Amino acid sequence: MTAEKSGIVCVGILCADILGKTVNELPEKGKLSLVDSISLQIGGCAANAAISLSKIGIGTCIIGKVGDDSLGKFLLDALRLENVDVRGIITDKYITTSSSMVLISSDSERSIIHSMGANKHFNFEDINPEYIKNKKILLIAGTFLMPDFDGQGTEQLLRFARENNVICCMDTAWDSTGQWLKKIESTFKYLDWFMPSYDEAYELSGKNNPAEMANFFISKGVRNVVIKLNSEGCFVKPENQPGFKVPSYSAINPVDASGAGDSFCAGFIAGLYKGWDIEKCAKFANATGAHCVMRVGTTAGIKSMDEILHFMKIYEERNHIKVTG
């Protein structure tokens, strides 16, 4: 008898973010400038998604790599505090933890100085298959920012997950090396859901229409596609069905867009985990992303599943939108 699968596993990047606010210009060499605040926060696509899922109320494990340093300890403690299972995280004493210096200007725009650190060295051999095969859903988060894992390593993991009947999802990041499709095309045939942003989908497909983008990915072997359209919501193309757009919750007042894409993916996957229809998954994903941008930080605004569903109900009733079951 096959054991019943439960929980979600997020594989990918973890990062310590050092935020400085307000920074409108850098001091001259050898000089000092004052800022309003400096804070240390957890970041990285996999960490953001895992924390969001845990806050929604779904048991989540995370797999990645950190250094044996103070920032690595901070990330592990922050994840544990959010009830994320960290047994899949490798601590390597020979490398440093990935980190970013985030400079926030008075107009809320961010400039980032980033060190790839441990994420650069994360690879397939760092993954214990026991943390994968009994999970219901796998999310690979941060593709293009893990050079030793992207491509072949990712393909190995997805093949293993597919062989063990795990639902396979992938969320991409920006590819600063410009390899794009060449780097990850071999992984597409193992993906149940591909979840890029519009800009990433454009670079990968060469198309500028969400429907054409989705059809391109499906022609390459992806089963289902959801494309994040920022403030416009998302476009969904389920397998063997017409694609459709789901609008965002536009009446909210955004404060900080950091982590919105990661929380969107968490919301969508939460819906898949619960067995909802695809339109409800997309609406819940948009609502989860909306909660993210209403607070400063990548996960501070995320609420429980019941609270987000209540928000959706009230919003849709006020705006006379048909509520999906």
Image (cartoon, rainbow, N blue to C red):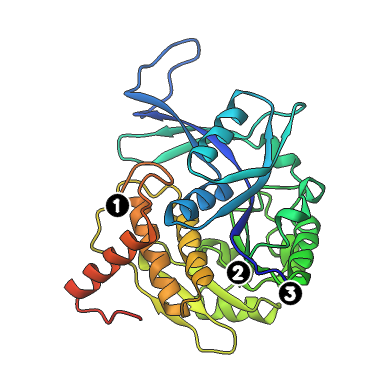
229, 38: nearer the viewer:
38
Count of residue discs: 3
Q: Disc 3 designates what residue?
A: 189
Farthest residue to the left: give it: 318
Query: Mark 2 vs mark 1: which is more N-terminal?
Result: 2
Residue 130 x/y as whole percent: 75, 55
Circles 3 and 1 in contact, beta carbons < 8 Å: no
Earlier in the chain: of badge 2 and badge 3, it is 3
Which of the marked residues, 3 or 1, is nearer the chain's N terminus?
3
Q: Position of residue 46 (x, y in %)?
A: 58, 50
In this rendered view, identify the residue nearer to me: 321 or 197.
321
Q: In this figure, which residue is indicated by the disc labeled 1? A: 254
Residue ranking furthest to the top? 30
From mark 3 to mark 1, how far is it between C-alphas? Answer: 36 Å
Residue type beneath disc 3: Lys
* Mark identifier at residue 194: 2
- Mark 2 lies on a secondary structure that is strand
Amino acid type at image mark 2 = Phe
Residue 182: percent from left, percent from top: 75, 63
